[in-house]
Amino acid sequence: MKNLDSRQVNILKTVLFILALLPFARLVLFTLTDRLGANPIEFITRNTGDWTLYFLCFTLAITPLRRITGWNWLLKLRRMLGLFAFFYVALHFMTFFWFDHFFDLAEMWKDVLKRPFITVGFSAFVLLIPLALTSTNGMVRRLGGKRWQWLHRLMYLIVPLGVLHFWWMKAGKNLLAQPILFATIVSMLLLFRIWHKTKAKKPL
């Protein structure tokens, strides 16, 4: 499994694409069959928020996993995982903007400024937009490799902001098991990167 040819990678990407759409398909099915529970907005908000964090963590895990296993083909999955994180955070934001504020920009902005956990979540969403817009090969060429890499290092800020948003939201309900799990996973992934960078700089 260390080396996969382009055909095998394409098959894997197709399978991953279908699997990544399953949470969205479930939401659509539950909406059409009236199975969203007593509070449909909360169900959609929670579900899309959870999957945003899952895909952000998957994306962040690609490089450490590649370095540990030597599976370089994993890098070919990273863009898709990142775009699915943006897809679910866009659904998460639209649920907030549409159902909570009925497309009223002024009211939404007041809410963003008034409630810190929304401020943090909104900041993470805004920071993800340029990453999604520059995810194509054409944009990589236009920006140049180094500038593109520096821009996409925003992930190291976005993911902790997403976890903090989730933590604050759950803390009000005294439900900290999931936030602690996410915080632990993200901390380990970031610490691995710091350790690997420090190790690479050490003289032989």
Image (tube, grey):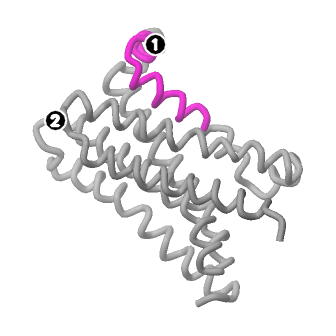
Give the residue type that dot 2 points to: Asn
Under tag 1, what secondary structure?
helix
Residue carrying label 1: 113
**Count of numbered tags:** 2
| Quadrant housing residue 197 | bottom right
Does residue 97 appear to the left or right of 200 in the view shown? left
Q: Nearer the viewer, mark 1 or mark 2?
A: 1
Q: Residue at x 49, y 28 (%)?
A: 122
Residue drawn at the location 24% of the way across and 36% of the way down:
42
Residues in magenta, as a range: 107-127
The three-letter code of the residue at mark 1 reads: Leu
Q: Residue at x 61, y 34 (%)?
A: 127
100 is within the stretch colored magenta: no
Q: Which label sits on residue 89?
A: none
Number of other residues with Cα within 10 Å of mark 2, as a class: few under 14, some 14 to 19, many 20 or more: few
**Image coords of residue 99 (percent x, y):** 32, 27
Quadrant position of the N terminus in the picture = bottom right
Determine which residue is flagged by label 2. Answer: 39
Q: Residue furthest left?
A: 38
For residue 109, above or below residue 55? above
Q: Quote the CA–CA distance across marks 1 and 2.
A: 25 Å
